[in-house]
């Protein structure tokens, strides 16, 4: 099983409603430590594919600015 965002294994959180999983590192990097802590406390979790509401600010910001999220951070010069 691999993370739906980065495609790597690691410490995965699996959805209780589908076959998707997300790694803790991606959840924290994209949505913050508070969101990761909240997900880990849940008995049953509905992932960001099943319930995309927590990712709306990420998507809406990109629509507003026309920016894209880079796959990898740029290397320092």
Image: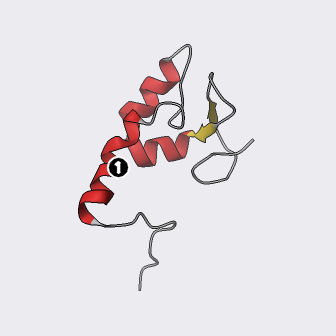
Q: Position of residue 34 (x, y in %)?
A: 36, 32
Q: Position of residue 70 (x, y in %)?
A: 45, 67
Q: Quadrant of the N terminus?
A: top right
- Residue labelled with disc 1: 58
The quarter of the displayed image where residue 67 is located? bottom left
Choose between 43 and 33: the one closer to the eye: 43
The quarter of the displayed image where residue 54 is located? top left
The quarter of the displayed image where residue 68 is located? bottom left
Image position of 73 with respect to 19: above or below: below
Exactly how many numbered labels are in the figure?
A: 1
Q: Position of residue 35 (x, y in %)?
A: 40, 32
In the displayed image of the protein, which residue is found farthest to the top?
A: 43
Q: Secondary structure at mark 1?
A: helix
Mark 1 crowd level (few <14, some 14–19, many ≥20, 10 Å Cα): few
Choose between 53 and 71: the one closer to the eye: 53
| Residue shown at 45% from the left, 69% from the top | 73
| Residue shown at 53% from the left, 31% from the top | 50
Q: Residue 12 vs residue 64: left or right?
A: right
Q: Quadrant of the C terminus?
A: bottom left
Choose between 48 and 39: the one closer to the eye: 48
| Residue shown at 32% from the left, 59% from the top | 62
């Amino acid at each position: 099983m691999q993370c739906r965002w980065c495609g790597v294994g690691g410490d995965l959180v699996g959805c209780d409603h589908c076959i998707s999983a997300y790694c803790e590192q991606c959840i924290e990097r994209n949505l913050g430590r508070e969101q990761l802590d909240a997900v880990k406390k849940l008995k049953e979790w509905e992932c960001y594919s099943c319930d995309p509401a927590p990712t709306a600010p990420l998507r809406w910001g990109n629509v507003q600015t026309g920016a894209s999220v880079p796959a990898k951070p740029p290397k320092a010069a």
